Image (tube, grey):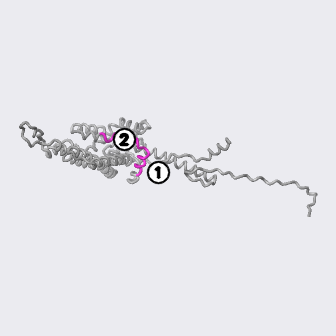
Amino acid sequence: MAKNIVQQQRKRPVREKKLRLASLFTDAPVRVEPEEEKKVVVAGLVEATPKKDYPTGYIARAWAVFRGEFATLFKASLYFLIFTLPFVVIVGWFSNYFETMVLGGTYNFMGDIGIGYPGGGDNIAVSVARLFWDVKAPVYCILAGTLILGSLGLGGLFYCAKRSYYQDYYKKITKTYWMGFAKYWWKYLVTMTFAILVGLAMAISILYLLKEQQLGTAGAGAYCAVVFTWLFGAPLLTIPVVMCGLFASYELTFAQAFKNALVIIANSPVVVAIVCVFSAAPLLLCLINMIVAVIVYAVMAVIGTFMLALFWIAVASRGMKKCHVMLEDMQRVALQNAKRAAKRGNGYVEGQAETYNPQPKKKPQQNYYQNPKKKKKK
């Protein structure tokens, strides 16, 4: 009986850890970048390029690269800040100017208080509603346009961050940045335009609800608009984050990067969600007031932009490696099961249990001895 149990255990197919959305995944290698011309130290000998001992963990490696390559990445991010100057102008000057122009800046909330004070005062609820819908909503739309313009510079920034992350060292920072800009500007523009428009829809839905609440006319439509835009918008924002990390790092087309982003999100949802929340925090802080927005912009200008780029690249690298390993396991297990099925010839079908039907062995026929001297009876 024990022998039969051992045989049945051996006949079972190997369990596989399935890769979700495996049909969409493209197993691509990391992009190989052209090396810079190295300085000739001695005749026939060029300057050596040392390799730094960074951690193997992806997020830990991004943090180590951030500290080890701070000077190089800071210089590269200065070119990206050129594309963000319209954002500074809108936040630092135009938003206050536009509010004064629309609302006038003078309010009288003391009318009709019943002690002889002249009537005709302003309604505070109406004034706040106008602040939300007539001032903040148009300003957010203008800010979205400036962010779309700023996304043009992400190609060069991610290219420099990618080379630092994979230790493809470079010293000509200006040339390297604009090389990446020429290669990837349109990919980052299309991807981030989608992300910014989704984020704008989420922000406008909240402003509309706040305006309706101030006026006391908030209905089911206003609440449903917030629920649906955030319910569908928040997951959609994870796709551009992963795609931006894939563009400069892997040999993928735009369509392949989009499909791989879906696969990575499906197989590593927690890590992607954490990085997305961390990335959205600076923009949310900018909405508090002008002073906070200026402080956040200064911090992002010094360290924030290329730090986020490194983290996005790390998430994409981690996801690609995980999906690569899972895909190899699936192929290996499928090959093993196919070989076992072919060896037994019992028509094994994947996902079904195998049946073991041993054929009964035929007993060999016994040849009886016959004395040749005896004559056969006729």
Where does the C terminus fall, quadrant-wise?
A: bottom right
Residue 279 in sight? yes
What x and y, as percent, mark residue 371?
A: 91, 55
- In the image, taking residue 338 as reference, residue 367 lies left or right, namely right
Q: Give the camera-side residue of 55 and 111.
A: 111
Number of numbered discs on residues: 2
- In the image, taking residue 73 as reference, residue 45 lies left or right, namely right
Per the image, label 2 sits on a secondary structure element best described as: helix
Say if 84 sits above or below 376 in the image: above
The question of residue 273 being in magenta is answered with yes
Q: Which residue is mark 2?
A: 275
What x and y, as percent, mark residue 147?
A: 27, 47
Q: Identify the residue at horizontal 91%, vertical 61% (top origin).
A: 376
- In the image, taking residue 341 as reference, residue 100 lies left or right, namely left
What x and y, as percent, mark residue 251?
A: 41, 50
Q: Which residue is mark 1?
A: 22
Q: Identify the residue at horizontal 16%, vertical 41% (top origin).
A: 124
Give the residue type that dot 1 points to.
Answer: Ala
Q: Looking at the magenta stretch, what is its main secondary structure?
A: helix
Give the residue type that dot 2 points to.
Answer: Val
> Which span is picked out in magenta?
259-281
What x and y, as percent, mark residue 320?
A: 44, 46
Q: Give the camera-side residue of 6 and 177.
A: 6
The question of residue 218 being in magenta is answered with no
Dot 1 crowding, Cα within 10 Å, few <14, some 14–19, many 20+: some
